[in-house]
Amino acid sequence: MVRQAGAETIVKVSGLGKFFGAHKVLDGVDFGMGVGEVLAIIGPSGSGKSTLLRCLNQLEPHSEGVIDICGSRIAADAPLSRRDLNELRRRAGMVFQSFNLFPHMSVLRNVSLPQERVLGRKRAEADERSRALLDRVGLGAKADQYPARCSGGQQQRIAIARALALDPKIMLFDEPTSALDPEIGLEVLAVMQELAEGGMTMIVVTHEMHFAETVSDRVLLMAEGKILEEGPSVEVMRNPKTPRAQRFLQAVMNR
Amino acid sequence: MSDLLSFWATQLPALLRGMRISLQVTGMALAIGIPLGLIAALAVQSPSRLIRLPALAVVEVGRGAPALILLQFAYFGLPSAGIQLSAMMAAIAALSWTTCAYTSEIIRAGLQAVARGQQEAATALGFSRLDELRFVIVPQGMRVAAPALLGFAILMLQATSLCFTIALPELLSQAYQIGTITFRYMDTLMLAALLYAAICIPATVLVAAIERRLDRHTA
């Protein structure tokens, strides 16, 4: 399913560079995407995929270039104030590989607390929204449990609900299924697919090639901190042009 | 034997009065010192030198100087600076400082044990720095620190015995007093030791139970 990307641009990245010490992990990255688009970022480990994603919500401040995201402009030499950053992060929901639920709070509190603190919702209103979202990811019955009592797949779906509760404009997924065994990963992918079909704008860093090919509209293939290939998913994944991309896809598709 | 028991029975009320004071000093030192310890733990991690350096000074002096010196300083030293403290106030002030200094290190270790992903998740959700600490980092860090803090609280009760050097009528002073009157030091000190143990041993058991309870939700 390929949807027509909206005309309105939600993310535009130009000349993005990132150093860790003297090591350049991102080098001259440019890309853009429209509202409602689903973008998959694939590539070998250490290619800078996660760092790129983490620059978008400034968990990692970038070293070079400009990021326009959800109406905020972040230049490397003009970082945002914490206040503006919080506003950006509210609009860009993130889901982590390691879920990062708050273990000392019930599932319901995990989803409700950010709404109360960040959006200023009242407890009752936040809880109502949380229960609706937990139902949507199939975990309404887990609301009063603690995260440690939930499986990894359940925890990740709760983390998705927690991010969605802030009504984000875009969702950033950082290898959401990499910590899960393949069978459990499917339940998370199903939730993500449903989100994509509902029109959510998404960037997904992933090793799930099937998901990248069938759910995302476009694919970025990265290696050594650069974008090697970019285009409609099937095209990039079936007919890669560069030898490096061919090698990578050969390795991951035929297993 | 019955002589010893009847001696103890006569002296017990005075020792219990002393014990009450020991517990009061301990309670106040912890009630003041631990919150200050939390603040110091956060302050020594501050990126601002203006905050970090004074906090470091408070912590290092408090840990470097023996509690006995701090007590003497508060009771005998401060009057020459024009500050007169009662024995009780001096004891609370000095032991609060010790508590603050030691617990700040315990709490700092607890805060640093909180998984990095927790802070990232709070940041990514748009929490303010204060909310991040209040709802995510501090509650989890304090859980990690709790067993060590409770152990420290027991040590603090024992440290109140140092207050007999500033004439605070706590448990050891009372025992000493009785000793000088009756010359039965051994018998009196034995009873005092039993009273300390009567608090500390159940407290240790309680700490272990609390520790198990705190571990409940950790994966």
Image (cartoon, coloured by chain):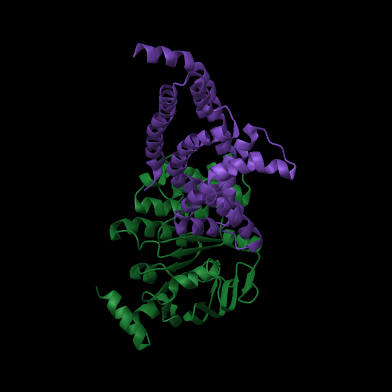
Chain colours: A green, B purple
Where does the image place residue B125, in percent across and percent down from the top left?
Answer: 54, 56
Where does the image place residue B190, in percent across and percent down from the top left?
Answer: 40, 25
> Quick check: can you spot residue A106?
no
Quarter the N terminus of chain A occupies: bottom left
The foreground one among B86 and A244 is B86
Residue sitting at 29 percent across and 59 percent down? A181
Position above or below: A127 against A80: above
- Outermost residue, right side: B82
Where does the image place residue B167, in percent across and percent down from the top left?
Answer: 59, 31
- Residue A1 lies left or right of residue B125; in this view the side is left
The foreground one among B21 and A92 is B21
Quarter the C terminus of chain A occupies: bottom left
The foreground one among A159 and B197 is B197
Position above or below: A47 against B209: below
Residue sitting at 34 percent across and 88 percent down? A243
Residue sitting at 59 percent across and 44 percent down? B70
> Quick check: can you spot residue A196?
yes
The foreground one among B1 and A244 is B1
Task: Give residue B87's quadrant in the image.
Answer: top right
Count of picture labels = 0
Where does the image place residue A98, in percent across and percent down from the top left?
Answer: 40, 58
- Outermost residue, left side: A255
Position above or below: A187 against B210: below
Task: Give residue A47's quadrant in the image.
Answer: bottom left
